């Protein structure tokens, strides 16, 4: 099987627009019939317009990945109704790098459907995209959502050939609470096989920081984030018998030399403070893992932050550098 890197590289001009659902829904323990993105009547394929008029080809090949022929399957990676992921792929003989997307929502809400256009933007660049749902805090407490993320990744790697996916060349991108899961996966033990990078957009890296910053504040979002962290921990605060679960949730404390490089993006005045990224950067740098922190002016959080001019492009460029260098 040929490597995707040998025949093409990435177009890096996609931006994010509002969500639109294109996937099908699978029954439990099943893989749905593929949906062809941009398919018209009688099975004919019509190109889906890119978020920007013309993706720029890379200098190395002069060839931008094709949008036509992209399929979307909804896959069950576990028994729970939330243990589902949408897989965007092209059924060819290449081994393409992968991007795993994790939605936010206070660990208690949200859905992969809100990541549809982000999924589309990465699929248009030639990646295999895994847009995952996971059990929420109302379904199960920590570490259930992290366990689900591991389950989605393991399923993708196990069935890599089905989706033309290179199981040893992927990144994980998480938004807000999903950023907590992405960075938690990135710092688990001494690194996951094949994980080349982690991106957090407004990630709640330190639930303990969220807990502390939510005490006595007038900011309703900080108060809600504190309550959400308590709910994720099973309803208990970080003392006594609950200290162990809070320790497990605290991403910076699990930094190790084998962890993947990270890119973290915050707004300067959003309710998930840059203190989260400062702590993680300090711990990862102590063990020699590179961390890039970008700070944008303003209060935008999560997807609105990602939509700011230039942010998505910077993230996509960083992702491309990690996956292209690993795929050669």
Image (cartoon, rainbow, N blue to C red):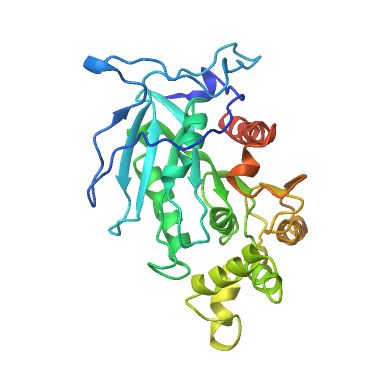
Image quadrant containing the C terminus: top right
* Tally of marks: 0
For this rendering, which residue is in front, 107 or 97? Answer: 107
For this rendering, which residue is in front, 107 or 259? Answer: 107
The percent position of residue 206, horizontal first and vertical second, equals 65, 65
Residue visible at 65% across and 32% down in the picture: 321
Above or below residue 169? Residue 182 is below
Residue visible at 53% across and 54% down in the picture: 178
Going by the picture, which residue comes out furthest to the bottom?
Answer: 240
Residue visible at 65% across and 68% down in the picture: 210
Above or below residue 155? Residue 5 is above
Image quadrant containing the N terminus: top left
| Residue 145 figure quarter | bottom left
The percent position of residue 22, horizontal first and vertical second, equals 36, 33
Left or right: 153 in relation to 308: left
The percent position of residue 297, horizontal first and vertical second, equals 78, 44
The percent position of residue 250, horizontal first and vertical second, equals 62, 68
The answer to whether any part of residue 254 appears in the image is: no
| Residue 134 figure quarter | bottom left
The answer to whether any part of residue 49 appears in the image is: yes
Left or right: 103 in relation to 240: left
Above or below residue 112? Residue 140 is below
């Amino acid at each position: 099987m040929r490597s995707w890197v040998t025949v093409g590289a990435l177009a890096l001009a996609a931006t994010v627009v509002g969500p639109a659902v294109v996937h099908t829904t699978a029954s439990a323990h099943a893989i749905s019939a593929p949906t062809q993105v941009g398919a018209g009547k009688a099975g004919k394929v019509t190109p889906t317009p890119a978020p920007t008029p013309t993706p720029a080809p890379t200098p190395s090949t002069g060839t931008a990945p094709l949008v036509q022929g992209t399929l979307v399957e909804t896959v069950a990676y576990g028994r729970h109704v939330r243990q589902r992921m949408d897989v965007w792929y092209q059924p060819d003989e290449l081994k393409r790098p992968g991007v795993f997307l994790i939605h936010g929502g206070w660990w208690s809400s949200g859905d992969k459907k809100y990541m549809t256009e982000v999924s589309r933007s990465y699929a248009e660049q030639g990646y295999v995209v895994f847009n995952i749902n996971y059990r929420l805090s109302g379904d199960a407490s920590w570490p259930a959502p992290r366990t689900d993320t591991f389950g989605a990744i393991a399923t993708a790697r196990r069935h890599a050939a089905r989706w033309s996916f290179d199981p040893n060349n992927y990144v994980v991108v998480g938004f807000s609470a999903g950023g907590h899961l992405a960075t938690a996966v990135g710092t688990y033990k001494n690194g996951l096989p094949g994980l080349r990078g982690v991106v957090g957009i407004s990630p709640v890296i330190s639930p303990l920081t969220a807990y502390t910053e939510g005490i006595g504040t007038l900011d309703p979002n900080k108060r809600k984030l504190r309550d959400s962290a308590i709910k994720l921990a099973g309803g208990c605060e970080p003392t006594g018998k609950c200290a162990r679960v809070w320790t497990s949730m605290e991403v910076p404390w699990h930094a190790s030399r084998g962890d993947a490089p990270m890119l973290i993006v915050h707004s300067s005045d959003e309710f998930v403070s840059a203190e989260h990224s400062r702590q993680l950067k300090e711990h990862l740098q102590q063990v020699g893992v590179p961390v890039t922190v970008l700070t944008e002016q303003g209060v935008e959080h999560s997807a609105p932050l990602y939509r700011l001019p230039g942010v998505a492009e910077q993230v996509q460029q960083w992702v491309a550098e990690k996956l292209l260098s690993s795929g050669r």
